[in-house]
Amino acid sequence: MRKEITPIFGGKKVVLVETTRAVTPFAGLAVFAEFLAKIGYRDVVAENMPIVYTSGNAIAPEETFTAFLISVAAGARRFAHTGLLRADKALQVILGISRFPTDHTIRNLFKLFTMGNVYRFFSPIWLWLIKRLPELASGYSSDLDSTVFERYGKQEGAKKGYNPRKPGRPSHHPLLAVLAEAHFVLNGWLRSGNTGTGRGVVEFLKESLAMLGEVHKVRVVRADSGFFAKELFEFLEERGLRYIVVARMTPWLKREATRVRNWRELDENYSVGEFTLEIHGWKKERRFVVVRERIREDRRATGRKLIDVPGYTFRIFATNCPNSPEEIWRDYDIRADMENRIAELKHDLGADDFCMKQFFATEAAFRSVLLLFNLLSEFQRASGMTSYRRPQTLRSTVFLCGAILGRSGHRKILHLSQAWGGLKNRMPLIDRILSYEFPTSPKLITEMRT
């Protein structure tokens, strides 16, 4: 069978013919598959998978789960999109599975995740990931933030709450903690849409710190004004943890900001000052750092305007760090990268698009996307990439590569297209993955010896 078509800009006819050979546009995922094999991914997922099928004809749940992760890595943003890979026989050879599950099979797997199953499956996997994080002598910066997942239809936990893009639209309101230096999602909770930003943050941090254990230190906890609450400060102080949190501009804080007299100019536009204050209901005074910025016509100033001090905007940070005010400010500004992590989860990996009626099924899918994000981050460290790349960039520069499946005797061979960078561009990544030695904390070495 053949068909001739006319090129858009003219020229000779192009002949279309069929081929019986398996073709894939995602041959570059072979590099990621090699990484998963190197870290023992299959055994960890299979050992901790709480779902068991009794039918001998069923696809193993760990294979179905992996098919979902690979689909998202390839660009799926809906469960229905995962079905596009069912015809990709060459990719299935890379994964080592004989049948690719349908989107219904993937949905049905997540529907079996109860609250207990979510905990039993993801908790040990996160501990497995955390133990391979590189150790930082100074400790990691832990950034807290929340985001809004807009929902359509009727799903459990989808409630009307804070939704700046579409006020009144039901949503979920996830809470996230990220280890900034490692581009690693330490923890994530899916919450109802009517939940306040800081609600449950103390319990959330208890769980997050328990997962870190004694293996890694936390240098500082950073958060925006949605987390400005004495309960959080008291918890962090009890644990001996440093924090920098944007202060909510209450009347008391506005008044104290206007009373600062000892401003230290950093340049012609910025000045810093500080004060201590015991807010009503608190048990002690706490330190507040103030950044004053001159309003300019050619630049949008951040912060809030105060009626008593025209011509400036103000930002106030609550902190127990001993550093100078400008160091506190610069340290917090690095937290802006947290917004990039949320954007990558939503726009590159579709974290807000995989939704089902059952709340814990949706949470299982959400945490699966977080797991994939962490695997992609570690993949970059293992393959020796010198700078962090967002998932979409990995997809376009590494994972996308046309290839044809062939045979040589009893061995299957995947012919990668040179036009897509072929094997030449990916061989160094595979070699570095194979020679990669996973960092082991001295604390773990001590434990193993004892």
Image (cartoon, rainbow, N blue to C red):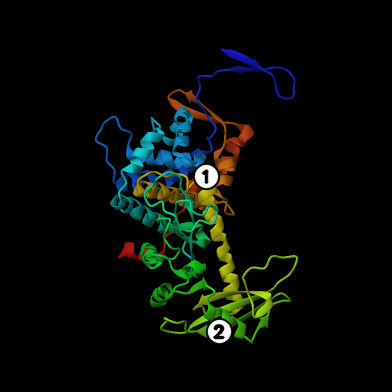
Q: Residues within 10 Å of mark 1 (few under 14, many from 20)?
A: some
Q: Assign a secondary structure to mark 1.
A: helix
Q: Which residue is mark 2?
A: 275
Which numbered circle lies on residue 325?
none
From the top left corner, tell me how far across and down residue 339 is, in percent: 55, 58
**What separation in Å lies between label 2 and label 1 (alpha carbons)?**
55 Å
Query: Where does the image place residue 395, in percent across and percent down from the top left?
Result: 55, 42
Q: Horizontally, is 225 left or right of 449 in the view?
A: right
Is residue 314 shown above or below 205? below
What residue occupies the far top of the structure in this picture? 1
Residue drawn at (54%, 48%), measured in percent from left and top? 347
Which residue is pictured at 43% across the width and 63% down the height?
Answer: 196
- Res 436 visible: no
Q: Is residue 4 positioned above or below 121 on the image?
A: above
Position of 70 with respect to 327 (left or right) is left
- Which residue lies at the image location 65% right of the left edge and 83% below the top edge? 263
The residue that label 1 is drawn on is 431
The three-letter amino acid code for the residue at tag 1 is Asp
Residue type indicated by callout 2: Phe
Q: Position of residue 213 (x, y in %)?
A: 37, 65
Mark in front: 2 vs 1? 2
User: Which residue ends up furthest to the left in the rendered image?
Assistant: 54
